[in-house]
């Protein structure tokens, strides 16, 4: 996905809301700017642990509506698989 963004007379840009939401960028956050050839990359400047936590939160957020913990849910899926395997044995 790409988008054209204008630079103000003060050198400022506005990151579209969809992008801020997707990358969890809020007012006051710091971005890391990298140059690769003729390409300018901007990304959130977060410590690796914070990036990892965000990935985990996003993944487990999909299970937020479950009435059991994620671990219990995975355990129940594994048990169901084992039962299915046992039923398939002659």
Image (spheres, rainbow, N blue to C red):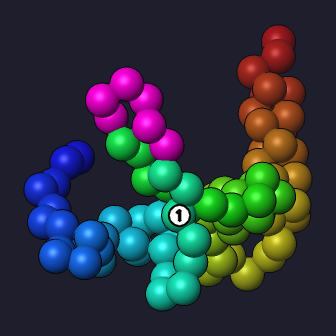
Q: Position of residue 66 (x, y in %)?
A: 68, 76
Which secondary structure dominates the residues rendered in magenta?
A: strand
* Looking at the image, residue 10 lies above or below residue 89: below
Q: Which residues are magenta?
A: 34-39
Q: Given the current orientation, which residue lies at the most extreme front position?
A: 10
Residue 17 rendering spot, x and y as whole percentages: 29, 77
**Dot 1: element:** strand
Q: Quadrant of the C terminus?
A: top right
Residue situated furthest bottom in the rendering: 27
Q: Is residue 62 visible?
A: no
Q: Residue at x 53, y 64 (%)?
A: 31
| Image x and y of residue 24, in percent | 51, 72
Q: Residue 75: image x %, image y %?
A: 87, 53
Task: Evaluate whether residue 59 shows in this view.
Answer: yes
Residue 62 figure quarter: bottom right
In the rendered structure, the answer to whether residue 35 lies left or right of residue 54 reads left
Residue behind mark 1: 31
The answer to whether 9 is drawn above or below residue 4 in the figure is below
Who's the residue at 39% across and 72% down the image?
A: 20
Local crowd at mark 1 within 10 Å, few (<14), some, or many (≥20)?
Answer: few
Q: Looking at this view, is 1 or 62 the one in front?
A: 1
Residue closest to the eye, 19 or 43: 43
Residue at the outermost top position = 90
- Whether residue 78 sits left or right of residue 16 in the image: it is right
Q: Quadrant of residue 19?
A: bottom left
**Is residue 61 one of those drawn in magenta?**
no
């Amino acid at each position: 996905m790409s988008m054209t963004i204008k630079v103000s007379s003060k050198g400022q840009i506005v990151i579209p809301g969809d992008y801020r939401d997707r990358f969890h960028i809020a007012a006051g956050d710091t971005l890391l700017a990298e140059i690769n050839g003729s390409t300018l990359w901007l990304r959130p400047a977060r410590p690796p642990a914070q990036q990892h936590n965000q990935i985990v939160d996003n993944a487990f957020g999909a299970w937020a509506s479950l009435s059991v913990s994620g671990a219990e849910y995975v355990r129940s899926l594994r048990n169901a698989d084992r039962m299915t395997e046992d039923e398939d044995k002659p």
